[in-house]
Amino acid sequence: MHTTSPAPGAVVAEDVSKVFFSGTDPVWALEDFSLTLEPGSFTCIVGPSGCGKSTFLRILGGLEERTVGEVSLPAGEHRIPAAFVFQEHGVFPWMTVRDNVAFGLRMTGTAAAERRRVAEDWLERVRLTDFADSYPHQLSGGMRQRVAIARAFATGSPVLLMDEPLGALDAQTRMLMQEELIALWEAERKTVLMVTHDIDEAIILSDRVIVMSGRPGTLREDITVPFDRPRSFEIERDPEYAALRARIWNLLREDARTAEETA
Amino acid sequence: MSTETRTEDRERRTLVAAREQRARDRRLATRDLVLAIATPILLLVLWELCARVEIIDPRFFPPPTRILGAGWEMLLSGELWQHTAPTLMRLAVGGGLGALCGIFVGLLMGASRALNAALGPLFSALYPLPKIAIFPILLMIFGPTELPKIIAVFITTFFILQINTVSGVWAIDRKLLEAGSAYGATGLARFRFVVLPGAMPFVFSGLKTATGTAVVVVTAVEFTGATTTGLGYLIWNSWQLFIPEKLYVGLVVIGLIGALVTTILSRSEKLLLPWRRER
């Protein structure tokens, strides 16, 4: 755990708890969860379903209220403190791909010409220039998620929060998107926190993997991923990769079974 | 035969088969169109013949050509316009304003929990009241002027649009509302870029329903004798004077108005909601 004071620009959550009521019984979704994200780091949270990892992400993003605890994002720097990427159906069906990508900029009052320039740039980087005037329903699932990711990066916000952004894609599209995401992030170095249920995805993408316990969600283990950047799927051949993968799976296995049986 | 020519030959045969399939699809589409147009024409011809040889009583069912002739005469004499214009005005002013207010109030109620709590149950209770039953009250308050007729149509479209718009706002995917707030859409921007476009499909279905109902209400109001103009009055008066041709002319024109407004709405829906196309 980080006991030293965080670097400027860090994302800090301290002793965050979330309790909601099911009938008269209080249910603890999160219990005293603390996390500090270094600026420019990529962190993944893995955990059994229902462990509150998405809840934590939504609390950071301001989409849900915490019961107690403190959250601080690098404030004042940007009008959108954290840009969110949803699992699916998060892009506006009534806007063209270009308008979707430029949406955050439009909301922050960026001038039209600048908005267009940034949007075109991001469309090119996610290879959607030819689809700029299409509507989301005309795109494949992978392309729609590229729109969602471009929309988040295009805001220029220093923090990106991703809630299983590749979770609804088929296995092959997903691997391609992971490669693209690595490349985009390595060029931009935003502070990213991503929730996933895919251990391989967590290792390949992140500097750090946070393993959470089952409900109530608490921090079980904080693992540093040792592989150098720039990264590719080559690291899967490294024996250290297999060891890391096994270690994370062992941590998750018990809780995953409990979650499965009580679901 | 060389492998190359065999491949070419196979390719040619496949293309021929594909063209045949496409030609068959087109033939079927043409047939559907012909059937759709021919059926009503056939029925009209049948009606004409039956009325001419008096299989059906031509006093009650004048042959279509006689109705058309009567309509032409009324058009030339200005009588038709004299009745069509007031009906159109009542529909446009009452129905149009009612729809606009309904959409506006519906959006506010969809966005504000407090407003919906205050007005929702009240509007739900008022909505099923037959608007015709309120008409005498309106007459009593406003006297035999245009106002009560316009208000009756206004109330009709207002409630339908208000209810549809609220449903439309509630039907917006929660993820999209969250995406809106996550990207800084608040206040008016939230309405303009998220809530309004999200509710539009329901608004349009409400507009189409309201058109049909508004035409019924305006006709019924004109039946009541509170007016001497309008297509409803033309129909009612023609019955009392027993001029069945004019009665049918009124009926046809009212039907055309309903069909025309519905068509305009469908076209504007396609134009304004391009993201709903190709579904």
Image (cartoon, helix red, strand yellow):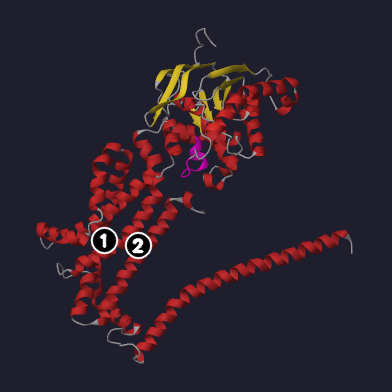
The quadrant of the picture occupied by the N terminus of chain B is bottom right
Residue A256 lies, with reference to residue A129, above or below; the image says above
Would you say the residues marked 1 and 2 are in contact, meaning their CB atoms lie under 8 Å apart?
yes
Magenta-tinted stretch: A92-101
Query: For the point 82% across and 60% down, which residue is it?
Result: B7
Residue B261 marker: 2
Quarter holding residue B84 = bottom left
Residue A206 lies left or right of residue A35; in this view the side is: right
The one of B216 and A106 positioned closer to us in this rendering: B216
Residue A179 lies left or right of residue B262; in this view the side is: right
Q: Looking at the picture, which amino acid does disc 1 mark?
A: Leu
Residue A102 marker: none
Query: Distance between the Cα atoms at labels 1 and 2?
Result: 10 Å
Q: Residues within 10 Å of mark 2 (few under 14, many from 20)?
A: some
Q: Looking at the picture, which amino acid does disc 2 mark?
A: Val
Magenta segment includes A100: yes
Query: For the point 21% across and 82% down, which residue is it?
Result: B242
In the rendered image, residue B175, in percent from the top left (x then y), is placed at 46, 37
In the rendered image, residue B49, in percent from the top left (x then y), is placed at 39, 88
- Secondary element under disc 1, as helix, strand or loop, is helix
Residue B91 marker: 1
Q: Chain of mark 2?
A: B
Can residue B146 be spotted in the picture?
Answer: no
Q: Chain of mark 1?
A: B
In the rendered image, residue A127, in percent from the top left (x then y), is placed at 61, 38
* Name of the residue lying farthest toward the top: A4
- Secondary element under disc 2, as helix, strand or loop, is helix
Residue A149 lies left or right of residue B4; in this view the side is: left
